[in-house]
Amino acid sequence: MSMRVLLFTGKGGVGKTTVAAATALRAAAGGQRVLICSTDPAHSLADALTADLGDQPSEVTGFDGGGRLAAQQLDARARLEESWASVRDYVAAVLDWAGAGVVEAEELSVVPGLDEVFALADIKEHATSGDFDVVVVDCGPTAETVRLLSLPDVIGWYMDRVFPAQRSVTRAVKPILSRVVSMPVAGDDVFAAARKVYERLDGVRDVLTDPATSSVRLVVNPERLVVAEARRTFTYLALFGYHVDAVVANRLLPAAVTDPWFAEWRATQAEQLAIIESAFGAVPVLPLTLAAAEPVGTDALLALAGDLYGDHDPVARLAEPAPLRVEAEGSTLVLSLPLPGVERGEVELSRRNGELFCAVGAYRRALVLPDSLQRREVAAARLHDDRLDIEFVEA
């Protein structure tokens, strides 16, 4: 079997860490070399596995099988220090020059959320190292995960288009500025540090959006707010080309619970489960019953994985991807983008210099148009069967 990367995410508290750990243990017990790493700032993976985990992979024992399991809780802050120190020092110097105090300049020089970028680079390195057959990622809550997975697109767009121009301008004006003002001007070391960040991320998107290699699995509870957030996440992931191959419906009331006190709860769960099964199209829904005790430790997690996957391979691709495609309809070419769960009026489209910008909610993706579409004009766009179809006609 080829290399697999499984990313688990869900609203905080739905049990995604437990499901991710159970999946990793099941794969290792089946004879595969598995790494599970946590990018969730809360880092509850060590508690689930009852193991001492650090920033580097360490062996997890306590289960039978021919495989092995390593686990780590990524220290994104340490990665930030390794790669961003030159840029941070420059920004702090500019802020200090502008009048901010030393402490304030130091705090303001770190872009919020930037430390998470480097977690992506580690995932790519593990996936391409040849040391593991499976990499399981315990991601942060859904909103953080979407932001994290959109970063390769955003940073790649900036580095390819804006970065070269900024560097050229800085080189041209630096000799003049250095004579006129005392403001610190970015040197080659600053641009080299920014380029190093980009190079570490280069290829991350290719790995994580390849459906033969990577899949996202959404963990939900049958609760109205949780399901609503999962549906939005499903849409945003599709916008950036990530493939969801399963939805885990966790903490369903067991049939053995018949007390009338639970009747309303059971009815609500049944209603939300029906919404889950209809809202995610052809993506399979894996039901998981509420455990009698907290599933902590290898034995409990392996039992949970048995309930979840049965006799199936836990790392197999569970659904076929819905790729972006270009099709001909007479003389019209149609660019079709998977975009499930979107209503009319929620999508904004714009076009500039051979790129099509598609925005849904707070997220926007830039699509580089193939040559066959760059010479054409957009005539219309429509939502159909969970896809956004954009018609291009001859100019």
Image: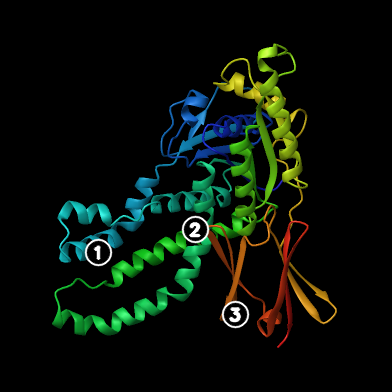
Q: Mark 3 is on which residue type?
A: Gly
Instruction: Identify the image quadrant of the C terminus.
Output: bottom right
Q: Which mark is drawn over residue 90?
A: 1
What distance separates the C-alpha of mark 3 from that of mark 1?
34 Å
The answer to whether the residues at label 3 and label 1 have Cβ atoms under 8 Å apart is no
Residue 13 on image: x %, y % = 53, 31
Disc 1 or 2, which lies upstream in sequence?
A: 1
Q: Which mark is drawn over residue 151?
A: 2
Query: Disc 3 on helix, strand or loop?
Result: loop
> Which residue in the structure is indicated by mark 3?
354
Q: Mark 2 is on which residue type?
A: Leu
Residue 159 on image: x %, y % = 45, 70
Query: Disc 1 on helix, strand or loop?
Result: helix
Q: Which mark is drawn over residue 306?
A: none
Q: Is residue 30 depicted above or below 334 in this figure?
A: above
The answer to whether the residues at label 2 and label 3 have Cβ atoms under 8 Å apart is no
Residue 319 on image: x %, y % = 76, 46
Disc 3 or 1, which lies upstream in sequence?
A: 1
